Amino acid sequence: WYEAPRRIGDKIGRLLGAAPGQTLAGESTTTNLYKLAVSALRMRPGRAKVVSDALNFPTDLYMLQGAVRTLGAGHRIELLDSPDGIEMDTGTILEAIDEDTALVTFSHPTFKSGYLYDVEPITRRAHQAGALVLWDFSHGAGSVPIALDDWGIDFAAGCTYKYLNGGPGSPAFLFVRHSLQEQLRPSIWGWF
C-alpha cells in the first residue's frame, strides 16, 4: 500500500501522456488543486494575478478564492467572461496573461458546455510571461486525448470517478512536471 499512490499514479499518467514519476493518486480533486495552486503561487513571488474564466468548474473557483485569501499579499483572480456562455476566445486568454500573472488555470474540457481549450498556445503564452499553468482534467481524463508532457503542462489534477470509471470514493490524481518537483514546496505537510 505504501507505494500505491505512485504506482497507480504512473498508470493514470500513461493515460494522460505523462512520463513516470510525475503523477500521484490520492486525496480529492479540490485538495490537490488547492495544494498545487498555493504552491505555484508561492513559486512566483512578486506576481499577484491568477487568470481563469467563468466557465471554470465552480468548486475550482471557490478553491482559488480560498488560495488567494490564504496567501493574501495582493493576490487576485482575473476572471474572464465567455462571450456566449459556451466557449472562450483564445485571444482574450492570451491577452490577459502578462508579467504580473503568477498562475493560469482552467478546466479542460469545461463542464458547462464541453468546450475544449487550445491548451498548447495558452501554456506557451503563460511560460513566455513567466507564469505557471494548472489544468483541471476531471472532465477530460478518460474522455479526450491529453498530452501533459507534450503540452508542457506544469501542474494538473483531476478525478478518477468520472471517465476513468473509478466509482464513488475513488481517489483523485495530481501531476507535477519533473523539472518543477525539486522547487515545489507543498502547502499541506503531513507524514508523507
Image (cartoon, rainbow, N blue to C red):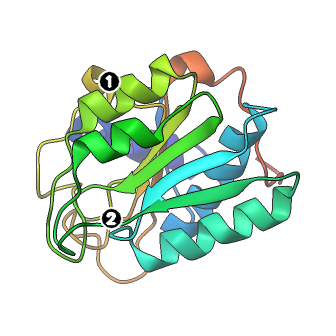
Q: Which residue does the numbered mark 2 point to in the structure image?
A: 160
The residue depicted at 33 percent of the width and 64 percent of the height is 160
Residue 59 rendering spot, x and y as whole percentages: 50, 77
- What is the total number of numbered labels drawn onto the structure image? 2
Say few, some or many: other residues with alpha carbon within 10 Å of mark 1 (under 14 / 14 to 19 / 20 or more): some
Q: Nearer the viewer, residue 41 or 83?
A: 83
The residue depicted at 65 percent of the width and 34 percent of the height is 100
Image position of 112 (left or right of 97): left
Q: Secondary structure at mark 1?
A: helix
The relative height of residue 169 versus residue 24 in the rendered view (above or below) is below
Residue 110 rendering spot, x and y as whole percentages: 25, 66
Q: Secondary structure at mark 2?
A: loop
Residue 42 rendering spot, x and y as whole percentages: 78, 39
Q: Nearer the viewer, residue 90 or 186?
A: 90
Q: Which residue does the numbered mark 1 point to in the structure image?
A: 149
Q: Is residue 70 visible?
A: yes
Q: Earlier in the sequence, mark 1 or mark 2?
A: 1
